[in-house]
């Protein structure tokens, strides 16, 4: 490997000619021009069918190793990074060669002038100096490698941070859009209704004539009754606990549901049994506000008629 040839100027007639008219004679000039070269001219010289830069480096500068490393690299920044890394390596090798040459020259010179003991002493000193120089340049090489890795990690970190910021923004937008209505609903003042549910206007669902109590059975005459049992919940204590059973009826429309009624409604995959504390209307139509008797806050969403599974008309303990 001829480092002087690789890092030196090529003969004038073997200079590299860019398609834009720029001419370079050494690898340093090549890197400088690549940094300002636009993508069009870069792809002209380095593409799927040719690599003019690699061919010139391997053929004229005779750095076949670098030429092989550049083969197939189509990203300009990566291309430049590989060349610069090679330059730094060759410069360190060249400095070590200079130190080695000086070291060997000094050894020969001293061997002519001094006794064996003096020669040994000088040799040890020069050896120590050589080790120090070698460690120094090796450490620099490792530091440069570490610096490159840190730079790479910083770029990746910046990329990931940008991606996460974008996703956070999208999530915030989604939450604000999807849950805006429930959040606004929760901000309404239902404090009077929470502690004082209106039970005065609940209509009679089962009249006396529809009930028959016998010695061994009770008969309730209802249209389309629904039997219900409850999970272990505390939201409706003391009215309902997990031992309570209920009979429900299916309302025909929302007008049959009154404030104070206990209803069962679907929420996702769950069935909730809570009391209606308010019936209101918006642009979509009527909706219900519900709350568990033992809860301190209202349920966070508007309940539409389509969600209602039934009205509780009888509780059995």
Image (cartoon, grey):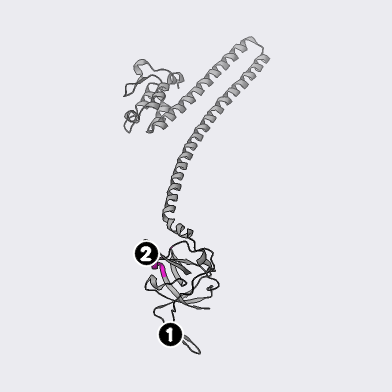
Indicate the quadrant where residue 12 lies: top left
Q: In the image, 176: left or right of 103?
A: left
Q: Is residue 273 visible?
A: no
Please report contact status of discs 2 and 1: CB closer than 8 Å, yes or no: no
In the image as oriented, which residue stretches furthest toward the right? 117
Q: Which residue is mark 1?
A: 210
In the image as oriented, which residue stretches furthest toward the top? 113
Measured Cα–Cα span from mark 2 to mark 1: 34 Å
Residue at the image position 52 percent from the left and 20 percent from the top: 95
Q: Which residue is mark 2?
A: 285
* Residue 114, position as x, y percentages in the image: 65, 11
Upstream in the sequence, badge 2 or badge 1? 1
Indicate the quadrant where residue 18 lies: top left
Location of the N terminus by quadrant is top left
* Residue 67, position as x, y percentages in the image: 40, 27
Q: In the image, 306: left or right of 217?
A: left
* Residue 167, position as x, y percentages in the image: 44, 47
Q: Look at the image and give the residue range highlighted in magenta.
A: 302-308
> 10 Å neighbourhood of mark 2: few (<14), some, or many (≥20)?
few
* Residue 216, position as x, y percentages in the image: 50, 88
Local secondary structure at mark 2: loop
| 256, 165: nearer the viewer | 256
**Magenta stretch holds residue 306:** yes
């Amino acid at each position: 490997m001829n480092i002087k040839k690789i890092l030196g100027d090529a003969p004038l007639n073997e200079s590299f000619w860019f398609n834009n008219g720029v001419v370079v004679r050494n690898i340093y000039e090549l890197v400088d021009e690549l940094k300002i070269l636009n993508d069009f001219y870069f792809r002209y010289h380095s593409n799927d069918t040719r690599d003019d830069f690699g061919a010139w480096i391997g053929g004229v500068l005779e750095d076949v190793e670098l030429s092989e490393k550049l083969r197939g690299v189509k990203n300009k920044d990566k291309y430049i990074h590989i060349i610069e890394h090679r330059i730094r390596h060759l410069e360190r090798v060249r400095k070590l060669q200079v130190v080695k040459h000086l070291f060997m020259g000094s050894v020969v010179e001293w061997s002519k002038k001094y006794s064996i003991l003096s020669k040994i002493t000088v040799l040890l000193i020069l050896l120590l100096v050589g080790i120090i120089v070698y460690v120094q340049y090796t450490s620099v090489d490792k530091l440069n490698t570490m610096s490159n890795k840190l730079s790479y990690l910083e770029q990746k970190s910046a990329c990931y941070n940008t991606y996460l910021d974008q996703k956070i923004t999208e999530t915030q937008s989604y939450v604000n859009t999807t849950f805006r209505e429930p959040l606004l609903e929760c901000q309404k003042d239902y404090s009077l209704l929470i502690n004082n549910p209106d039970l005065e206007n609940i209509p009679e669902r089962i009249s006396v004539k529809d009930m028959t109590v016998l010695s061994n059975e009770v008969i309730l005459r209802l249209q389309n009754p629904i039997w219900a049992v409850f999970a272990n919940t505390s939201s409706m204590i003391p009215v309902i606990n997990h031992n309570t059973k209920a009979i429900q009826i299916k309302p025909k429309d929302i007008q049959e549901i009154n404030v104070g009624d206990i209803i069962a409604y679907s929420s996702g995959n769950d069935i909730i049994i809570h009391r209606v504390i308010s019936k209101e209307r918006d642009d979509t139509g009527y909706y219900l506000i519900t709350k568990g008797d033992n809860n301190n806050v209202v349920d966070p969403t508007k309940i539409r008629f389509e969600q209602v599974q039934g009205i509780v008309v009888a509780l059995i303990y």
